[in-house]
Image (cartoon, coloured by chain):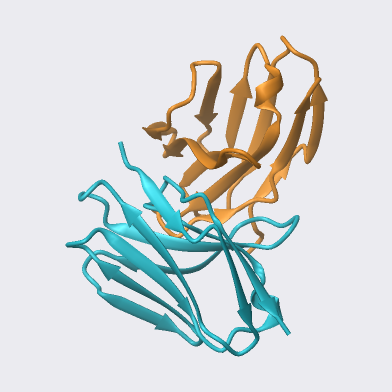
Chain colours: A orange, B cyan
Amino acid sequence: KAGVTQTPRYLIKTRGQQVTLSCSPISGHRSVSWYQQTPGQGLQFLFEYFSETQRNKGNFPGRFSGRQFSNSRSEMNVSTLELGDSALYLCASSHQGVEQYFGPGTRLTVL
Amino acid sequence: GENVEQHPSTLSVQEGDSAVIKCTYSDSASNYFPWYKQELGKRPQLIIDIRSNVGEKKDQRIAVTLNKTAKHFSLHITETQPEDSAVYFCAAPWVFGAGTILRVKS
């Protein structure tokens, strides 16, 4: 099976802009979770989508949102970017929400 | 909400020695505890996991133990090898520990 893919792999934006990241899960997986990874804060959970519904949510401001499509592909959107949003954004897919397999990540730099 | 603490933050061992990383969690309702290995510049990889109805699980040189009463779980790596050098994360299950940098010296 093909692994989890994320696009784009690298992104440079300026403060105030918005960004959309995409994640394609492993075929057959219905759960997609998103994480933010930074050197200072480690791996932090953003949200999980299962069958197009947000099932769990981390402690991030409303500027961070997501959605999942009927083919299980997921997108994450960050509006009004701040310098502190610079991070590696990882998505992970799983069949039922456990045994997560991570994608390569999208490296977002906010200038 | 759930809180996961992981110790130690760094661990250096000699090749062939054992390494133990410990995590504690706060939410007694948590029932799934995975461990991930992340090599430099790579994605986290699930290496082993345990569910709350099991006390111990082994996979070759790697084992995980769970103590639900004390709310802690541990990763044990035996006969460490240089390729075991990486950052290891515990989780419960979406809240991650801060990570442990494991260095295996040859």
Point out the image quarter for the N terminus of chain A.
Answer: bottom right
Q: Quadrant of residue A64?
A: top right
Nearer to the camera, A76 or A81: A81
Nearer to the camera, A76 or B59: B59
Q: How far from the left and from the top, in percent, is residue A29? A: 49, 52
Give the total number of marks visible in the rendering: 0
Nearer to the camera, A91 or A83: A83
Residue at image location 73% in from the left, 85% down from the top:
B106
Residue at image location 57% in from the left, 38% down from the top:
A41
Q: Which residue is most to the left?
A: B69
Q: How far from the left and from the top, in percent, is residue B66? A: 29, 69
Q: Is residue B105 visible?
A: yes
Residue at image location 30% in from the left, 36% down from the top:
B1
Q: How far from the left and from the top, in percent, is residue A84? A: 66, 24
Compared across the picture, whether B6 is left or right of B70 comes to right
Q: Quadrant of residue A80?
A: top right
Residue at image location 39% in from the left, 59% down from the top:
B23
Say above or below: A25 vs A76: below
Say above or below: A13 vs B106: above
